[in-house]
Amino acid sequence: MAKTHFVRNENLKTIRPGYPGNKMIGREFCNGDTLYEPSFGTVFRWKVLTENPQKEEKKRDTWAPTVVPCTEFFNSTDDMLVWLGHATFLLRVAGATLLFDPVLFDSPFLRRRHPLPCQPEELQNIDYLLLSHGHRDHLDEKSMRLLARQNPQMQVLTSLQMTPLLRDMAKGLVVQEAGWWQQYNLRPDLPLEISYLPASHWHRRGLNDLNRVLWGSFMIRTADHRTIYFAGDSSFADHFEEIEQQFGPIDIAIAPIGAYKPAFMMQLSHVNPHEAAKAVNIMRAGHVVPMHYGTFDLSDEPASEPLRLLQEVAAGGMLRGELHAPAVGEIMRWPDWE
């Protein structure tokens, strides 16, 4: 029987009292206390044995997010947030420039349904690159090579056991690995804290690396106690309540809403729009920015459905915070939200 043990980065602060570290069974990280191992049989059931009841509706749905240039981000030093599509965001806060989960190019299995709002070569002067997990729609090798070349000063903030994967993609990267509930070591001149937090998900990029790399989410907290939460990929689970207990109420929650059908395939990996609304309500988020929809075709729901359902929840008064559904490349500023 595989040995159970707990791991964390002993060089980083653990912010949750009594937390022993991330549970592993053998060489696999657990989803909290439980080992979750998605099976190829479920994929076979989805792709071969199951007919999408929304197949024709999905085919007719050609909606894609509006795209506007984000040139202002690169010509300013103001605090702002910009969605580049899917789960890729640029954030400038407290004098630091952060980039989340960069996928800047097409690949054989991921074709963008809309262009980037900037040229990849414009992504310079990045202080910290935040990688929530290792799935290919969040971590792209070509993007990593370009960003490492253009940003020699950049540090990568990510999860336990990610370094070998990153070093195969780009040489010379400075990487900090964290377990859940750990706080990264940042430059002392930055009035900022960044912590790695739980998510309910899993890892696989190849045939033999199931759950060998940890997955999670991020919390950014400024010296004046503004909080920005980036959920990464997650199904609905108890960690949203735990995060609220530690940090709530959250000022801004960047939350995934897409890739949820069929439920038998997706429900243990992703939230649907109603679950996303429940999660951000639990965290008492004042502002909600949806992501993980519209850019890539990953699942069976029609392209426009995730945002439409979330907008219906908000219009019905069932979303505690204010919904912001920006165009790709649209500049979002804090003063506009206060």
Image (cartoon, rainbow, N blue to C red):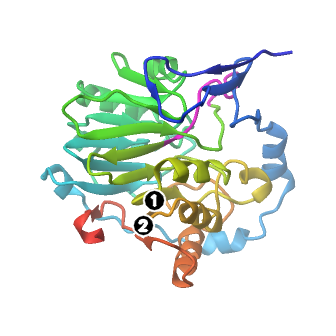
Q: Is mark 2 on a helix, strand or loop?
A: loop
Q: How crowded is mark 2: few (under 14 residues within 10 Å), some or many (20 or more)?
A: some
Q: What percent of the width, then of the height, locates residue 62?
A: 53, 71
Label placed on residue 286: 2
Residues at marks 1 and 2 touching, judged by CB atoms closer than 8 Å: yes
* Distance from the alpha carbon under mark 1 to that under mark 2: 8 Å
The amino acid pointed to by label 1 is: Pro
Residue appearing at x 77%, y 64% in the figure: 52
Q: Which of 57 and 238 is in front in this view?
A: 238
Task: Single out the mark in the foreground, 1 or 2.
Answer: 1
- Residue at 24 percent across and 30 percent down: it is 150
The magenta span reads 205-217
On screen, residue 156 versus residue 215, left or right, reads left
Q: In this view, does 93 lie above or below 24?
A: below
Mark linked to residue 249: 1
From what the image shows, is residue 15 above or below residue 2?
below
| Residue 337 placement: quadrant | bottom left
Image location (x, y in percent) of residue 157: 40, 31
Estimate how packed mark 1 is, as few (under 14), some (14 to 19) or many (20 or more) residues with alpha carbons within 10 Å: some
Res 134 → quadrant: top right
Left or right placement of residue 170 versus residue 237 in this view: left
Kind of residue at disc 2: Gly
Could you tell me what secondary structure mostly forms the magenta stretch?
Answer: loop
In the rendered structure, the answer to whether residue 326 lies left or right of residue 76 reads right
Q: Which quadrant is home to the N terminus?
A: top right
